[in-house]
Image (spheres, rainbow, N blue to C red):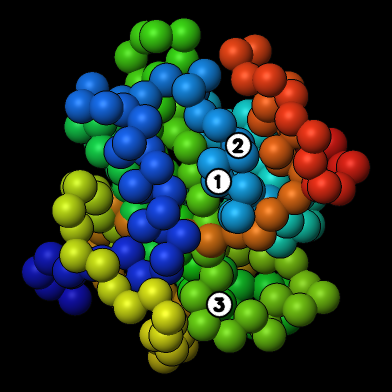
Amino acid sequence: MSGRAVFVMKHKNSHLLVGYWSRLRKGRGTPDQTEIDPRAIKRFLPYVFILDCENPARPVYRLAGTSLCERFGYELKGTSFLGHWEAQSGASLALLLDQALKAGQPLCLSSIAATTDNGMVELECVLAPISHDGGRPTRFLGLVQMMGNPAPLLRRTIAYERLIGSQLIQEGEPASSHDQMPPPPAPPQIKAHPKAPYLRLVVSRQSPVMLNFGSGDLLQKMARAFSNWPVANSEDDSRTV
């Protein structure tokens, strides 16, 4: 496919996260990690994560919500963000993460995730740059959303993910319908691949995009992790990351 693909954030929570990030920065380049209040994003907290990108080629999960970990079938904290992406997507993501940090803009990623038995779902991931200890932005506040029918992931975990689109998001991006989610795209055409022969890249990656989660344990975990936050009582589950 040639030319530049046009994207808008599809999921309501993607817009909510970017809006929250925009309010936090108050006209500055990026907000600081210590300014994030988990209670303000409790609605989708179980699918929220903090990504350390001191080296954009080796991004590492610093925190990850329980529901997100369950989606991949293992504890994400301390693991590579690129670990579940195929090689070509991983190389593109390293460049996109670096671009978003330098531009100080949220990045939205559109991807196809697959299970070991060939179940496929569309995901939308939002990565909003944040600074740490008042320095330059080296981290992201992230959120992953599932688009369309979740049935392929019932009692299954994601084994493989491929990037199909990306875009840097600016404030004032047009919103899509929040009440009626668009249907998932038609399955990609088959192409041989050692991990997922049924997937292929269908959209060029010239800019960034976003995704969705649930709610839960991360409220307490993030509050404890960031020293400037008071630890608030919550009804989240007891699993720790």
Q: Which residue is mark 1?
A: 41
Residue 177 shows in the view: yes
Where residue 19 sits in the image (x, y, percent)? 34, 47
The reply, left or right, for residue 131 in relation to residue 222 is left
Which residue is pictured at 63% across the width and 20% down the height? 229
Q: Indicate the amino acid at tag 2.
A: Pro
Label 1 residue SS: helix
Q: Nearer the viewer, mark 3 or mark 2?
A: 2
User: What is the spatial separation of the Cα atoms under label 3 and label 2, in whole angstroms?
Assistant: 27 Å
Q: Measured along the vertical axis of the image, is residue 236 above or below residue 224?
A: below
Q: Which residue is mark 2?
A: 38
- Between 110 and 177, the residue placed more toward the observer is 177
Q: Which residue is mark 3?
A: 121
- Figure label count: 3
Q: Tell me the quadrant of the picture where the N terminus can be found.
A: bottom left
Q: Measured along the vertical axis of the image, is residue 83 above or below residue 187?
A: above
Which residue is pictured at 68% across the width and 26% down the height? 223
User: What is the spatial separation of the Cα atoms under label 1 and label 2, in whole angstroms?
Assistant: 5 Å
Where residue 18 sits in the image (x, y, percent)? 36, 47
Q: Earlier in the sequence, mark 3 or mark 2?
A: 2
Q: Measured along the vertical axis of the image, is residue 113 above or below residue 103?
A: below
Q: Residue furthest front?
A: 233
Label 2 residue SS: helix
Which residue is pictured at 20% across the width and 47% down the height? 171
- Between 232 and 195, the residue placed more toward the observer is 232
Q: Are marks 1 and 2 in contact (CB under 8 Å)?
A: yes
Mark 1 nearby-residue class (10 Å; few <14, some 14–19, many ≥20):
some
